[in-house]
Image (cartoon, rainbow, N blue to C red):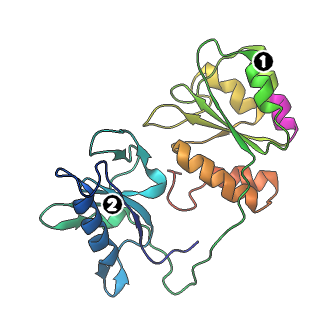
């Protein structure tokens, strides 16, 4: 919390000893970016991913290819920097922490989370088994488009039972870009009505991590729900 130094993650699609490796450029540029300062302060005081000439906010990124050098994308947020002959930073998109305040580290994570990816013909017994997992604290539903699911009575009832047992149910889209808008279509109205939390434009990775962090703080459920829809580290658009 209140990170004031850069943490730049990188890697490569080919080993560093391969003739056509992307490792050298990725590593050198990541180091140069991490060392960049402006007015004596670190220019990128956040967790980011550098890959194939672009710097992405970590909690906005997802891996999209196992073969292409452009392996990562940040579909709902602009890249933070671009590497060419010069490094070009998009300063307006970078986080601005309080450089005079201390950085805090949070180690308490609650991993009692399950995921449910929607598909046509999804089986009632599968859904019932997932929501009945012992000690389940949160369920992430990956839905269609802007947050749509089946409207079958059994499905809504399953989720409603979970919510009544204080399981936090979060709705995120299977689409790589865009945002969940519960109630935009009839096929998501019931989710909104029973108390499913709309995950807006959170990536799958950011949703899981954010839930682990918030659940680990043992906050009242209403507070956790509220924080899930607020930007804590630039992970979603409010």
Residue at mark 1 to residue at mark 2: CA–CA distance: 44 Å
Q: How many marks?
A: 2
Q: Could you say which is closer to the camera, residue 113 or residue 66?
A: 66
Q: Which residues are magenta?
A: 160-165
Q: Is 164 included in the stretch rendered in magenta?
A: yes
Q: Earlier in the sequence, mark 1 or mark 2?
A: 2
Q: Residue furthest right?
A: 165
Position of residue 109 measured from the top left corner of the image (x, y, whole percent) = 71, 59
Q: Residue furthest front?
A: 17
* Residue 142 vertical placement versus 35 (above, below): above
Front tag of 1 and 2: 1
* Residue 231 vertical placement versus 87 (above, below): above
* Residue 223 vertical placement versus 43 (above, below): above
> Which residue position is annotated with label 2?
80
**Badge 1: few (under 14), some or many (20 or more) residues near its Cα, within 10 Å?**
few
* Residue 185 vertical placement versus 194 (above, below): above
Contact? badges 1 and 2 (CB < 8 Å) = no
């Amino acid at each position: 919390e209140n990170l004031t130094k850069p943490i730049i993650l990188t890697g490569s699609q080919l080993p560093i000893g391969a003739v056509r490796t992307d490792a050298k450029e990725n590593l050198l540029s990541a180091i140069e970016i991490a060392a960049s300062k402006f007015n004596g302060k670190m220019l990128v005081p956040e967790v980011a991913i550098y890959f194939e000439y672009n710097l992405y906010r970590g909690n906005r990124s997802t891996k999209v290819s196992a073969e292409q050098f452009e392996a990562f994308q940040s579909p709902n947020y602009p890249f933070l920097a671009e590497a060419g002959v010069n490094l070009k930073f998009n300063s307006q998109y970078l986080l601005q922490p309080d450089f005079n305040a201390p950085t805090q580290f949070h180690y308490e994570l609650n991993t009692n989370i399950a995921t449910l990816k929607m598909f046509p013909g999804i089986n009632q017994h599968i859904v019932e088994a997932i929501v009945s997992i012992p000690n389940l604290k949160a369920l992430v539903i990956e839905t269609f488009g802007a947050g749509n699911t089946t409207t079958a009575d059994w499905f809504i009832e399953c989720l409603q039972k979970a919510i009544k047992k204080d399981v936090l149910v979060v709705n995120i889209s299977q689409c790589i870009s865009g945002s969940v808008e519960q109630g935009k279509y009839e096929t998501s109205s019931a989710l909104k009505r029973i108390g499913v939390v709309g995950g807006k434009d959170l990536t799958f990775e950011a949703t899981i991590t954010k839930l682990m962090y918030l659940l680990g703080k043992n906050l009242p459920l209403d507070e956790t729900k509220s924080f899930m829809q607020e930007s804590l580290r630039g992970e979603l658009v409010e």
